[in-house]
Image (tube, rainbow, N blue to C red):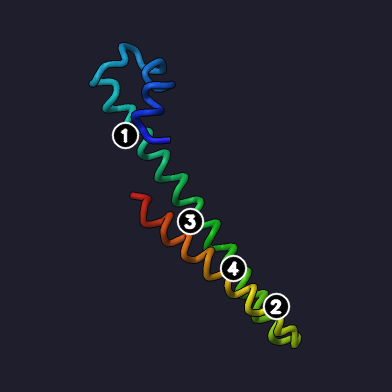
Amino acid sequence: MDFEAWWNQHGQFCRAGGGDYEKTFAFRAWEAAVNMERKACAEICRSDALKMEQEALQAIENGEHDEVSSLRSTAWRLTVAANAIGARAG
C-alpha cells in the first residue's frame, strides 16, 4: 500500500488535525517503517539463498546431482529478490 492510500484509509485518523503538518510527520514514520520491513525481507531472502547454496554443496558431496540445479536456481531467485527489495529500501 502506498502512503497516500494508507493516509486516506487510516493515517489521518491517527493524527490530531490530520492536516499537512501532521501528514509530513506521518509520512516520515511510514517511510521508516516500510524501509525497515524491506530490509528485513531482503535479509530473510539472503539467508534462505545461503541455506539453499549450502544444501546444493551438500547434494554435490552426497552425489545427489539431480538436486543441485533446482537448489541453485532457487538460491539465485532468492538473491535477485533480496537485491531488488534491498534496492527499494532507503
Q: Nearer the viewer, mark 3 or mark 2?
A: 2
Q: Are marks 1 and 2 in contact (CB under 8 Å)?
A: no
Please report the residue visible at 57 percent of the width from the left and 67 percent of the height from the top: 49
Q: Which residue is mark 3?
A: 42
Which secondary structure, mark 4?
helix
Which secondary structure, mark 3?
helix
Q: Are marks 3 and 2 in contact (CB under 8 Å)?
A: no
Mark 1 or mark 4, earlier in chain? 1
Residue type at tag 1 = Arg
Give the CA distance from mark 3 to mark 2. 25 Å
Q: Which residue is mark 4?
A: 74
Q: Are marks 3 and 4 in contact (CB under 8 Å)?
A: no
Q: Which residue is mark 1?
A: 28
Mark 2 burial class by Cα count in 10 Å: few <14, some 14-19, many 20+? some
**How far from the left and from the top, in percent, is residue 80?**
46, 65
**How far from the left and from the top, in percent, is residue 54?**
63, 75
Q: Are marks 1 and 3 in contact (CB under 8 Å)?
A: no
Q: Which residue is mark 2?
A: 67
Q: Nearer the viewer, mark 1 or mark 4?
A: 4
Which secondary structure, mark 2?
helix
Give the CA distance from mark 1 to mark 4. 35 Å
Q: Report the number of discs.
A: 4
